[in-house]
Image (spheres, grey):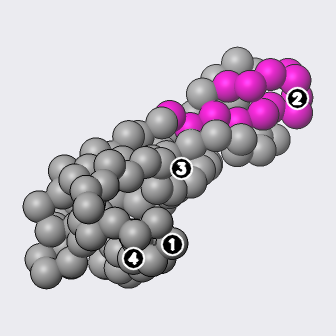
Amino acid sequence: MHEMSLAANVLQLVDAAAAREGFARVRRVTLEAGALAGVEVHALRFALAAVAPGTRLDGAEIVIDEPPGQAWCAACAATVAITARTDACPRCGGFGLRPTGGTALRVVDLLVAD
């Protein structure tokens, strides 16, 4: 499950931020896992819970926002909502879509404590 390596990367980002900003622990971490990011949110939540004990994430609230997928359709020159990268355009049925939103996994916000 690649979500375990993603959770480890989140922990590395938190540790790097703590080194820069001088905080001891995280009360809440807010992540964004877009619908087209290829992340199983339940597995990521499990993986974060598994890596958290004894770290700055121990006891932190984990919030994961899931923005929908969006793509630009070249055929109808419109931004459309999609649920998978293989979807056809819901307006014209074409497959000339370029994903433009909901493609990332990123740390959005940290609420920290000294």
Discs 3, 1 touching: Cβ within 8 Å? no
Q: Determine whether the residue tagged by mark 3 lies in a helix, strand or loop.
A: loop
> Counting residues from the N terminus, which is met first, the one under dot 2 or under dot 4?
4
> Counting residues from the N terminus, which is met first, the one under dot 4 or under dot 3?
4
Discs 3, 2 touching: Cβ within 8 Å? no
| Residue name at image x 56 percent, y 38 percent | 69
| Residue name at image x 43 percent, y 48 percent | 109
| Residue name at image x 74 percent, y 25 percent | 79
The residue that mark 3 highlights is 36
Magenta range:
68-80
The residue that mark 4 highlights is 15
Density class for disc 3 (Cα within 10 Å; few <14, some 14-19, many ≥20) is many
Can residue 93 be seen from the camera position used here? no
The residue that mark 2 highlights is 75
Q: Tell me the distance, in whole angstroms, between the alpha carbons under discs 4 and 1.
A: 9 Å
> Counting residues from the N terminus, which is met first, the one under dot 2 or under dot 1?
1
Choose mark 3 or mark 2, whichever is in front: 3
The residue that mark 1 highlights is 20
Q: Tell me the distance, in whole angstroms, between the alpha carbons under discs 4 and 3.
A: 27 Å
